[in-house]
Amino acid sequence: MKTSLYKFATNRLTSLKNTGFNYEGRIFEKSLSPYIMAEQNRREILTEFEKILYFTIEQVKLIKTFYNYTVDKDYKHLN
């Protein structure tokens, strides 16, 4: 099997730039008003929705990796 060009680049260059934002647990914190997150009941419901949204985003990244033939199947640096 051919060696991935991205794998070669990441091994050669140890620091990757523009790898994305670590948004786990902070999606709604960064995108909604603090007024919406002030109420405890609403915050609990939104944290459950945030887990579902985070899972969906991660699955889309897996699909992007699957259709990108130049990347290994375990590549984790997609935006």
Image: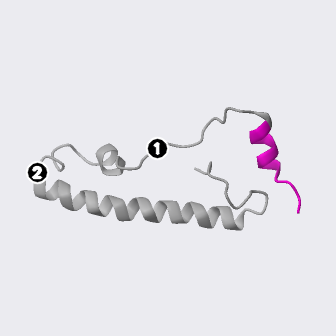
Is residue 7 found inside the magenta-colored segment of the image? yes
Examine the rendered structure and indicate whether residue 59 appears above or below residue 35: below
Q: Which residue is mark 2?
A: 39
The answer to whether residue 33 is left or right of residue 61 is: left
- Residue at left 35%, top 60%? 51
Residue 43 placement: quadrant: bottom left
At 75% from the left and 33% from the top, the residue drawn is 13
Tell me: 30 left or right of 20.
left
Q: Position of residue 40 (x, y in %)?
A: 11, 52
Q: What kind of residue is marked 1?
A: Asn
The quarter of the picture where the N terminus appears is: bottom right
Q: How many marks?
A: 2
**Mark 2 residue type:** Glu
What residue sits right under mark 1 in the picture? Answer: 22
Locate residue 41, reporting x and y percent.
12, 58
Image point (60%, 64%), residue name: 62
Name the N-terminal-most of marks 1 and 2: 1
Q: Position of residue 30 (x, y in %)?
A: 33, 43
| 22 sits left or right of 63 in the view | left
**Which residue is rendered at x = 63% and y = 35% of the image?**
17
Colour setup of the view: one colour
Left or right for 21, reference 5 = left
Residue 47, position as x, y percentages in the image: 26, 57
Element on which disc 2 rests: loop
- Report the Cα–Cα distance between label 1 and label 2: 25 Å
Kindly check if marks 1 and 2 are in contact, taking CB atoms under 8 A apart as contact.
no
Q: Residues within 10 Å of mark 1 (few under 14, many from 20)?
A: few
Please state the extent of the stretch shown in magenta in the rendering.
1-11
Classify 59 as above or below 38: below
**Magenta: main secondary structure:** helix
Using the image, determine if residue 5 lies above or below residue 58: above
